[in-house]
Every structure is written in C-alpha cells, then in structure tokens.
Image: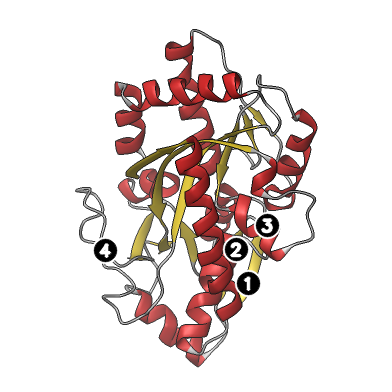
Amino acid sequence: MVVPMSPGGGSDMSGRSIAAGLEPVTGKTITVENQEGAGGAVGYSNYLTYNGDPGYLLATETALINLALTQDVPFHWTDFTPIMKVGQDSTMMIVPTASEFNSCTDVVDAAKEGTLKVAVSGSVTGNDAIQFGLIEQSEGITFQRVPYESGGEAIAALLGGHVDVGLANPSEVLGQMEAGEMKALCVIAAERYEYEALKDVPTTVEEGIDVTFAQFRGIIAPGGISDEAKEYWIAASQAYVDSPAYTEYMETNMMQKDPLFGDDFAAYLEQYEKDLEAGITTE
C-alpha cells in the first residue's frame, strides 16, 4: 500500500487502516510505504512505474484530482485503476484552545483587519489552499499562507504558535481536541457531522460563509492491470466494507460512509474533477 503523503496525516491513517482491514479478507500481508513529496505528486508520479502490476495499491484522496488540475504533473486519474471509494470527510477549521477565535466568522473578521497566518498542508495548490482560497473569494479577504508537507506538520506548527489557523479532518485532530489542546471553529460543509464529539460544531453555511468542500478517500490500483486483477481487488474491497474493521475505521475517524467500487468510483472521480475544476476556476 503506497501512501503518497507523510506519516501522521489523514492520508497516512487512511492507508494504514485500509491495509490492515484488507489483510484478513485477502489472507495477504499488506505493507505500507510512504512516498511523500510535493503534496503527493512524488508518490502519484512514481506509481506510474507500477503499471500492470496488481501487487500494489495506493491510498488516494482529493490530491489525485487537484494536482493534475493545478500543476504540471505527469499523471491523471485515468492513468490508474479506481478500486474503491471508502467514504468522505469534511474539513474543520481549527485553532489552539487558547486562541481568541471562537468561530469561523471571528477568523474572517480578523483577516479583514490585519494579517492572519494560516497553515496550508499538502502543497500551495492542495486541498487546504483550495479551501482557504474559496473562503478568500467568498469573503473578500486574504490570508498569509504558510506551506507544510503534511497535515501532521501543519498541526504541529499550529500547536507551536507558528500559525494562527489551520484546517484538518477529524481523524487528524480528534486526539488533540479530546485532550483540550485544540478546538474546531466550524466544518467546511453544508451539514454538521452527526458524531457525538462533533455534532455541536457549526458549519460554514450556518455562519454565513458560502463555502463547502468534501474530501474523498479510497484506493486505486496501477493502470494496465488485467480485468481479473481489478475484480479481485474490488471483491476484496466489498468484503472489507462488510467487515467490522470498516465500521471501526469509519467511526474512529468520523468519516461519512459512502462506498463506491470500480466503474462507479471512476464515474464519481469524473464528476468530482468537473466540480473541482469549476471551483478552482471560480477562485
């Protein structure tokens, strides 16, 4: 299992959890290898070299789409074989518990008054950058963006006081929230999370910020594999979704269940690309 991001972030957690969940249904040992760099571009580009080899999987997410839309990279999602969309999660705007900000509206107001440093993980054109950019466009503000390679590094910078505000998925910061180190100001979504620990976090829409964004997570195989190999991994993924390990992963990481497989996942990626391209163009 290739993870094209650094250890400690949401993509790394996703890849390791899915690999562990696939082991009992396949009877295989699935090791995890981080191939980080350039916000995922290094790992995805290197994955092209495994073309035709069904012995590899890659833990994918939104960077698969936005990197090809925003940077000169050698890959497109159609170069690979979509296997499974595990589900999706929405990002939360986060700050240290001691922060003066208590809402996303507070953050927007502060940005209108002066310089506000925000942590941008992945790359300058990654998910964080897109979401902050959409908020800038919606609210007529400008953030000072500080780039970090991974979500884990961005969170560390936020806790260390190097930046004022960050974005994270629940799985990346739930531990810090439970420990009283961080607080979530809002969810970048139209609807709240239903999980008990997050149900009181308002949405951007509730706060009058007309911006929403959902990140998918899943797995892809290399391009050029046989139909038999593709169906093998789809069947294994379907068995994983029916297992207690899947339910535990989704609930532990507070993700929204929405599994898709094979061609259905490919159709989702095609539409997601169109929607994301429209958002980037708007920005």
Image vertical order of residue 42 relative to residue 167, above or below = above
Query: Which residue, given by chain and number where applicable, does mark 2 sit on?
Result: 120
Front tag of 3 and 1? 3
Q: Residue at x 61, y 55 (%)?
A: 65
State left or right for residue 90 relative to residue 190: right
Q: Check residue 191 in the rendering and tell me which mark sits there, or answer none.
A: 4
Q: Earlier in the sequence, mark 4 or mark 3?
A: 3
Determine contact: label 2, label 1, CB under 8 Å: yes
Q: How many marks?
A: 4
| Residue 201: % across, % down | 26, 62
Determine contact: label 4, label 3, CB under 8 Å: no
Q: Check residue 145 in the rendering and tell me which mark sits there, or answer none.
A: 1
Q: Is residue 123 visible?
A: no
Front tag of 4 and 2? 4
Determine contact: label 4, label 2, CB under 8 Å: no
Q: Check residue 67 in the rendering and tell me which mark sits there, or answer none.
A: 3
10 Å crowding of disc 3: few (<14), some (14-19), many (20+): many
